[in-house]
Amino acid sequence: MSATIRIRRGPAPLTTRRTTGEDQANRILDIYGSPQRTGLEATRTLLRRQQLALLWWCVQMHITRRGKRVLDLVLASIVLVLTAPILVATAIAIKLESPGAVIFKQTRVGKWGKCFTLYKFRSMCLDAERLKKKLLAQNQVAGPMFKMEHDPRVTRVGHIIRKLSIDELPQLVNVLKGDMSMVGPRPPLPSEVSEYQMEYLRRLNARPGITGLPQVSGRSNLDFEQWVKLDLEYIAKQSIQQDLWVV
């Protein structure tokens, strides 16, 4: 048996029904609508709008990621070419001052917890990692990160290239490889990540960068909590325009 249902708006409850017509095989049921039924339709409309908003956000993020990667490749290539004489001179200076490798390689944690090998010009003595254990009590930064204003492990050439940020230039190779970006949170050590609170792990939601908001907002004057806050702010609002401003 089929029935034609007419929904009407009015104060009557849903339980109020009235059967009309003489043909019981095709009854007409009058069912009065209720605010709950109207609210259900509004909820469906709201959900559709939210789905469209989410879709548009995904499209924007995809465009931003693609654009950011292109920007990284272009900037890294240009900077490598322009700084080639500086790279050569720095390598010679490091080699003349002390024996050992010119490039310092270290395992760092990148996007989504993936580890990679980070490249830097060596600015410390060869046994820097062994000496670090003896200096932990002199750490000047709260949290898992280690930092000293007058680190005795830093060489004379190291002081100069650190002050001018020349020691970071080999990381342009990391950018070309896709391990890093020009702008983003600094890549932490695995030992630092093991001490992270749950909130800090959100730093790993973006590709790490050579520079970022903390570096242009106060650098060594910031404590670890402030670093994390600025990194999370960058991740939440990351855009090509913001990257260009930081660079």
Image (tube, rainbow, N blue to C red):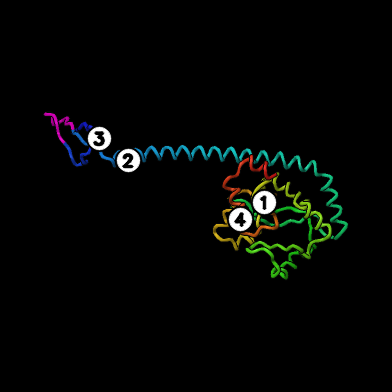
Q: Which residue is mark 3?
A: 9
Q: Check residue 27 for magenta coloring.
A: yes
Amino acid at circle 1 = Ser
- Numbered label attached to residue 217: 1
Looking at the image, is mark 1 or mark 3 nearer the viewer? 1
**Cα separation between marks 2 and 4:** 42 Å
Image quadrant of residue 61? top right
Q: Give the residues drawn in magenta, as a range.
A: 18-28
Residue at the far left in the pictured view: 22
Q: Position of residue 87 (x, y in %)?
A: 82, 48
Q: Is residue 202 above or below residue 75?
A: below
Amino acid at circle 3 = Arg
Q: Which residue is mark 2?
A: 39
Q: Which residue is mark 4?
A: 228
Q: Nearer the viewer, residue 56 or 96?
A: 56
Whichever of callouts 3 and 2 sits on the residue coming sooner in the sequence is 3
Amino acid at circle 2 = Gly
**Cα separation between marks 1 and 3:** 60 Å
